[in-house]
Image (cartoon, rainbow, N blue to C red):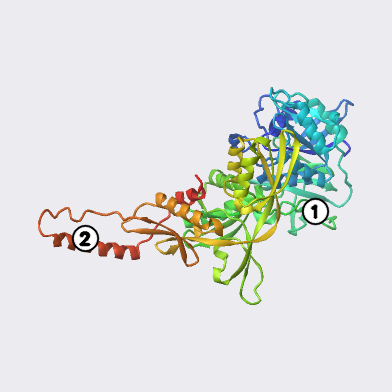
Amino acid sequence: MKNIRNFCVIAHIDHGKSTLSDRLLEFTNTISQRDMQAQALDDMDLERERGITIKSHAIQMVYLHTDQQKYVFNMIDTPGHVDFSYEVSRSIAACEGALLLVDATQGIQAQTISNLYLAIEHDLEIIPILNKIDMESAMIDEVSDQIMDLVGCRKEDIILASGKTGIGVPDIMRAVVERIPAPKGDPDGALQCLIFDSVFNPFRGIIAYYRVMNGTIAKNDKIRFFYTGRDYQADEVGILQMGLLPRDKIMAGDVGYIITGIKDVKEIKVGDTITKLTHLCKEGIQGFENVKPMVFAGVYPIDNDDFEDLRDSLEKLQLNDASLTFEPESSVALGFGFRCGFLGMLHLEIVQERLSREFNQDIITTIPNVSYFAKSTKKDSEKFMVKTPNDLPEPSSLEFVEEPYIRAQIITKPDYIGSIMGLCMDKRGILTKQTYLTPQRVELTFEMPLAEIVFDFYDKLKSISRGYASFDYARLDYRASDLVKLDIKLNGENVDALSALVHRTKAEYIGRKMCMKLKDLLPRQQFVIAIQAAIGAKIIARETISALRKDVTAKCYGGDISRKRKLLEKQKEGKKKMRQIGNVEVPQKAFLEVLKLND
């Protein structure tokens, strides 16, 4: 155990984690030059296309130190985007140290700070690394000062490196051996393994990745999952390199995988503890906090017959992405589907894309919203959670609604303070703190409603700050707000999938925008379609799509006017009857386009 080191790589998005990980793999000959490609650990097409890490990736490397001893490094490359911070919290629970990567051209960003605090809470040894020092725009001294202020280290503790050219890689390897402590644990004690990830293999079932805290796990051992209480046999155990390498046993302090032939996704949970039937542990490991979804959206199959296929796909995806939550729901407009919880809008986008690519699912996603608390005026009524706008009572019987607030941290250049403050105030934000980290970097802290950042806040922030502002948020509490349910009606019928909870001051503006948008998107019918936005029984906006009309008087040339009038009256009666029995189909494009209200 004294020659094992477990560490993860944490940083803000696009600071070069995956590129530096590639250099470490090359340096230790874990991957051959022939098999080497950029972002070697990112195995999803989506990750390569977007240049981001979505999943944490664990890999084992063998390093020969200057004292001629071999060390085993278990490294976890983690995502940098705020929407995937749950992946980071799981990786941190399985490690004793962390490489904190900071881009020398961009300096410390918001997600760097939140990931650092997460690592410090778990008592991890932090090794600060300044990356991209070979670039012309690198601000080595300035960013080094920022790191020293943040971490509280000396200047000589910071390692200068370049993921592109491999500068500083030998220094990083030495620092891992010398600074990160060896794992603690009793190889002869009761088996305790923390499951930090899992994947579904169609041929071999579920493969669980774990860190052994105490004890030893061997092939053919009879094991138990502590929290689910299920018993299995370990068909195969091994270590994680570029592929799965079987071993006879995995001992305390090490990271490995287990295959038990489980096919049912409900029988294994990320965060569970594996123990041995012959020597049961007394308690499970407290690994990482439970996931708290920030954004909810309805996911429906385009064809209702695919409902069970969609459930199966979501369960398999949940194995690979434990931060996804879902439960069945039904909608009048869309039929049967699922209410899914996501960590943010990028997470929602990635899940949509993965369902389409990996499971061939054609889906419709409703307007994303957050969860609220409401209380009815009825006697003895309790406060209850509102996950969809349709759960909200009528305005006449509603006492109050509470919405979730977040603490938003924005780090930017002083030039953009005015426009960023304007954006946040427009989103009902309250400025609580303004701190100059350096003369050229300022940190703004706002308290604002989560619902206001769900749609397009991040995109707008990036455009008004020309990409310089970085953003991170943490959940605060629920606060009473003047919220109303905005309904969209087509010919007097509510379209429940387009309902939204909005602040009363913005209800009319959003209602008008939605009606105008739908007028452009809905195809014309043989009858007049009334599009209305309503709060309760009060209509606050309306647009009308005129009917497609046939020229019924074309055959009347000359003659008495009463003939033409008779034909027009007959057509008018037909249109009236058609309007009463006609249905308006809302195309999928409309659901997606209504989200982009501010375009």
Q: Which residue is mark 2?
A: 568
For the point 68% across and 36% down, the residue is 414
Which sits in the foreground, 165 or 429? 429
Which sits in the foreground, 583 or 315? 583
Q: Amino acid at mark 1?
A: Gln
Q: Residue 125's spot in the image, x, y percent?
A: 84, 39
Q: Amino acid at mark 2?
A: Leu
Which quadrant holds residue 385?
Answer: bottom right
In the image as oriented, which residue stretches furthest toward the left? 559
Q: Which residue is mark 1?
A: 286
Which sits in the foreground, 372 or 61? 372
Label 1 Cα neighbours within 10 Å, binned few <14 / some 14-19 / many ≥20:
few
Q: Are marks 2 and 1 in contact (CB under 8 Å)?
A: no
For the point 82% across and 44% down, the residue is 120
Q: Is residue 94 visible?
A: no
Q: Is residue 193 visible?
A: yes
Label 2 Cα neighbours within 10 Å, binned few <14 / some 14-19 / many ≥20:
some
Q: Residue 302's spot in the image, x, y percent?
A: 47, 53
In the image as oriented, which residue stretches furthest toward the bottom? 379
| Numbered disc 2: secondary structure | helix
In this view, 193 is above or below 23: below
Q: Residue 486's spot in the image, x, y percent?
A: 51, 60
In the image as oriented, which residue stretches furthest toward the front? 418
Q: Is residue 235 left or right of residue 47?
A: right
In this view, 332 is above or below 169: below
Quadrant housing the N terminus: top right
Q: Which label's residue is closer to the chain start, 2 or 1?
A: 1
| Numbered disc 1: secondary structure | loop
Q: Residue 547's spot in the image, x, y percent?
A: 31, 56
In this view, 598 is above or below 3: below
For the point 29% across and 62% down, the residue is 575
Q: Nearer the viewer, mark 2 or mark 1?
A: 2
